[in-house]
Image (cartoon, rainbow, N blue to C red):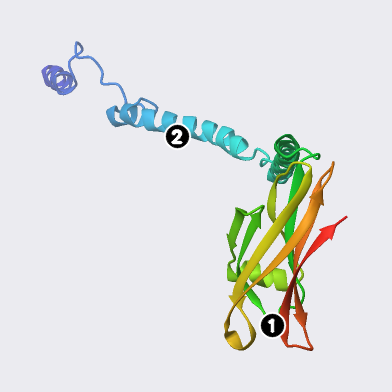
Amino acid sequence: MALVSIALAAGAFAQAPAGAAPQPAPDAAQAQPGDAAAAPPAAATAASDAAAPADSSASAEPPVDTKGLDEEIQGLKKDVVDLNKDLFVLEEELLFPANTQVAIFVSMDVGEFFAVDNVTLKIDQKEVANYLYTPREAEALMKGGVQRLYLGNLKVGEHELVAFFTGKGPNERDYKRGATLKFEKGIGAKYLELKINDRQRKQQPEFEIKDWE
């Protein structure tokens, strides 16, 4: 009996004390310290993913109709050009009324024997125009263009027009000629034309002033 009691007592001492608290088993679901720090980046990623569809929808807006805008701009430009033309005509009518207006034009036929450089106009012994032509303008005259050289006012009555032409004649020689016309200015606008013609028979240019009746 004594040996049995000693054995039981030794077994009791080998077991854990009754007062010690039992250690809980590790919980796999319990959050670790590192997990708490990793949570915010996950939330930021979710927020950026939510914002992505909004950005893509904003960029998917239809483009601006540039063709319609260009057509509107061209229409405005045309309106401005038309308005300027109307203002120019109105200005001429105010500055040069029909009852005193006189206009002088320059034209050239063929231009084989004369290349114009300069034209000087005198009305009643007073110089009213002195025009120096560029090569491009001279070429336009040779192609059939008509230039309005002078626009002014004259009172009713008799007047004298003198025109001097300077340029290159046959064989590239310096050439200067003049033409004179006495004309009557009546009531209404007066139109005169300075014509440069080629005379094939004489191989020389001819200058004349034509009165448009």
Residue 175 visible here = yes
Q: Examine the rendered structure and indicate whether residue 72 appears above or below residue 162.
A: above
In the displayed structure, 191 sits above or below 30; it is below
Task: Tell me the CA gap for discs 1 and 2.
Answer: 88 Å
Quick check: can you spot residue 26? no
- Name the amino acid, label 2: Thr
Position of residue 8 relative to residue 73, above or below, is: above
Disc with the residue nearer the chain's start (1 vs 2): 2
Mark 1 nearby-residue class (10 Å; few <14, some 14–19, many ≥20): many
Residue hosting label 2: 45
Quadrant of residue 27 within the rendered picture: top left
Disc number for residue 132 = none
Q: At which x and y percent is residue 43?
A: 43, 29
Task: List x then y, in percent, for residue 140.
Answer: 69, 69
Q: Which residue is mark 1?
A: 113
| Horizontal arrangement in the rendering, residue 141 relative to residue 21 (left or right) | right
Quarter of the image for residue 130 reads: bottom right
In this picture, residue 26 sits left or right of residue 182: left
Q: Secondary structure at mark 2?
A: helix
